[in-house]
Amino acid sequence: MKVIINRPNITPMKTIFIKASLLLFSLLIVEKANAQMSVRDQLVHTYSIVAKDKLTGEMAVGVQSHWFSVGTIVSWGQSGVGVVATQSFVNPAFGPDGLKLITEGKDAKQVLDILIEGDEGRDYRQLAVLDAEGMVSAYTGKKCIASAGHIVGDNYSVQANMMLNDRVVPAMAKAFEKNDDLPLAERIIKVLQAAEAAGGDIRGRQSAALIVVGPDPAPHPWQDKKIDIRVDDHQEPLVELHRILQVHRAYEHMNRGDLAVETGDMVTALKEYGAAEQMFPDNLEMKYWKAVALANNQRLSEALPIFREVFSADENWRELTRRLPDSGLLNLPAEELSKILELKSQ
């Protein structure tokens, strides 16, 4: 395991030094097509992780920051290729350029070296690259604001800057290594939670993001990211990110249930719908489509109580039910459809 923690010399003039540094870099402007954007516009101090699940081959980036919509510029990934986290005084080009270099045959270390060597602002950058083979490389510029550093481990790298203390990065590494029994996305959440518990960003919190890509190239661009969720502005972004991940998992069960219905496998369908409901028992959408599936499979008696519950909570679902036959989504004799539509609310 490679551990790098940068500790710039701290003087009684620390505050003045930091303000002067920020002012200096707010004046930098791009001069080349692939050179730096205004540092003032891309100042994203944060903590993040790039990682690969050795069992499934999935790769992920998780990130949290006291900055609006951090996921739009820090986290990058492509199925069958790799993932990139670019932060501190961030150079967003590192994301797409890094992935392109991997597709051209470069490994993670070569990619990082090329990007950093070609960047005049390298002293203020923080970058982590992981390729589909599991090779990972990370960099922390010597002028990143303390506490700043990274740890490179087996199939992962954790990195942070402007943290409250030096305990944040080691806490992230420990959390990743000890939660190897979890799916990769949930494991990433544990890492981000550990960073926050250890002190996190010295400024607090505002946004977070999580992407997961697969081990093999996706057949279509819209299938590239297996998970792509963001919290752009929230008082507790990690709490919200975790909640959204749970919603995502619930709808994975719903999707599998729908597929089972298509093949006539009602045992599997109801099992998947039931798993989704257990995760979000108050979700009317999940209840409603389960009832539709039951009705379409000659199990109206089981569907009616569910329809009644849904209609009692929101009459709009009754109106939706009237419209489904015309779309071929509810195929019932007229008398059975009437039994549903005439249900009295509880």
Image (cartoon, rainbow, N blue to C red):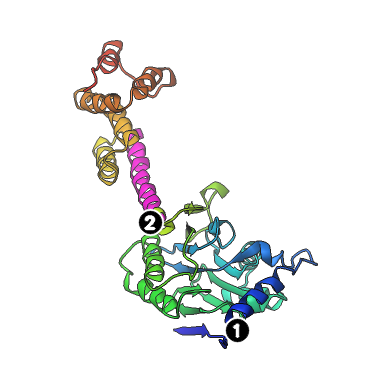
Q: Residues within 10 Å of mark 2 (few under 14, many from 20)?
A: some
- Label 1 or label 2, whichever comes before in sequence order: 1
What's under tag 1, amino acid-wise? Met
* Closer to the camera in the image, 206 or 255: 206
256 drawn magenta:
yes
**Under tag 1, what secondary structure?**
loop
- What quarter of the picture does the C terminus occupy? top left
Q: Residues within 10 Å of mark 1 (few under 14, many from 20)?
A: few
What's under tag 2, amino acid-wise? Val
| Mark 1 → mark 2, Cα distance in angstroms | 36 Å
Q: Which residues are magenta?
A: 241-263
Please provide percent x and percent y for residue 198: 38, 73
Query: Residue 239 has which mark?
Result: 2
Residue matched to label 1: 13
**Considering only vertical position in the picture, is 145 above or below 100?**
below
Residue 195 visible in rendering: yes
